[in-house]
Image (cartoon, helix red, strand yellow):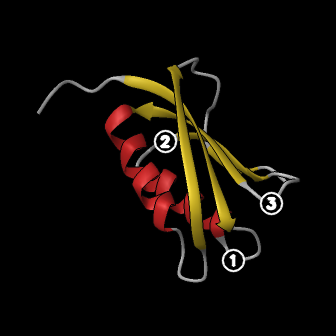
Amino acid sequence: MGKSEEKRARIVVRGTVQGVGFRYYIMQKAQEMRLKGYTQNLPNGEVEAVVEGDKLFIEDLYRAMQRGPTKAKVTDHVIDWADAKNQFRTFSIKR
């Protein structure tokens, strides 16, 4: 297994992603993977997550977000990578 690399990513999902527990789903997965950052609903109906941590775990979170919780229907998703800024202490839901 390769050495872990600390990265930052902004992930946005579109579809039926608000009002279906998506942010709680993301928070649970991110905490299980020891990722830090936040998730929030965007005014245009999308859900955004900004995460920092091990690149492999971020990739796992991204795959999980492509499915989402049971009632979600993800129609599109995007991930943008950056260098980690060590900006977060925990993972939270922004309201």
Mark earlier in primary sequence (2, 1): 1
User: Of the residues tagged 3 and 1, which is closer to the observer?
Assistant: 3
Q: Are circles 2 and 1 on residues that touch, CB within 8 Å? A: no
Residue 61 horizontal side relative to residue 24, left or right: left
Residue that carries the numbered disc 2 in the rendered image: 35
Mark earlier in primary sequence (3, 1): 1
Residue 86: x %, y % from top left:
57, 21
Q: Are circles 3 and 1 on residues that touch, CB within 8 Å? A: no
The quadrant in which the C terminus is found is bottom right
Residue at (80%, 60%) from the top-left corner? 45
Mark earlier in primary sequence (2, 3): 2
Q: Which image quadrant is residue 41 in?
A: bottom right
Along the line of sight, the residue nearer the viewer: 3 or 46: 46
Along the line of sight, the residue nearer the viewer: 63 or 87: 63
Residue 45 is marked as 3
**SS state under label 3:** loop
Along the line of sight, the residue nearer the viewer: 24 or 78: 78
User: Of the residues tagged 2 and 3, which is closer to the observer?
Assistant: 3
Q: CA distance from mark 2 to mark 3?
A: 24 Å
Amino acid beneath label 3? Gly
Crowding around mark 3 (Cα neighbors within 10 Å: few <14, some 14 to 19, many 20+) is some
Amino acid beneath label 1? Val
The quadrant in which the N terminus is found is top left
Residue 94 horizontal side relative to residue 91, left or right: right
Residue 68: x %, y % from top left:
53, 68
Residue that carries the numbered disc 1 in the rendered image: 20
Residue 17: x %, y % from top left:
68, 68
Residue projecting furthest to the bottom = 71
**SS state under label 1:** loop
Residue projecting furthest to the left = 1
Q: Is residue 63 above or below residue 86?
A: below
Crowding around mark 2 (Cα neighbors within 10 Å: few <14, some 14 to 19, many 20+) is many
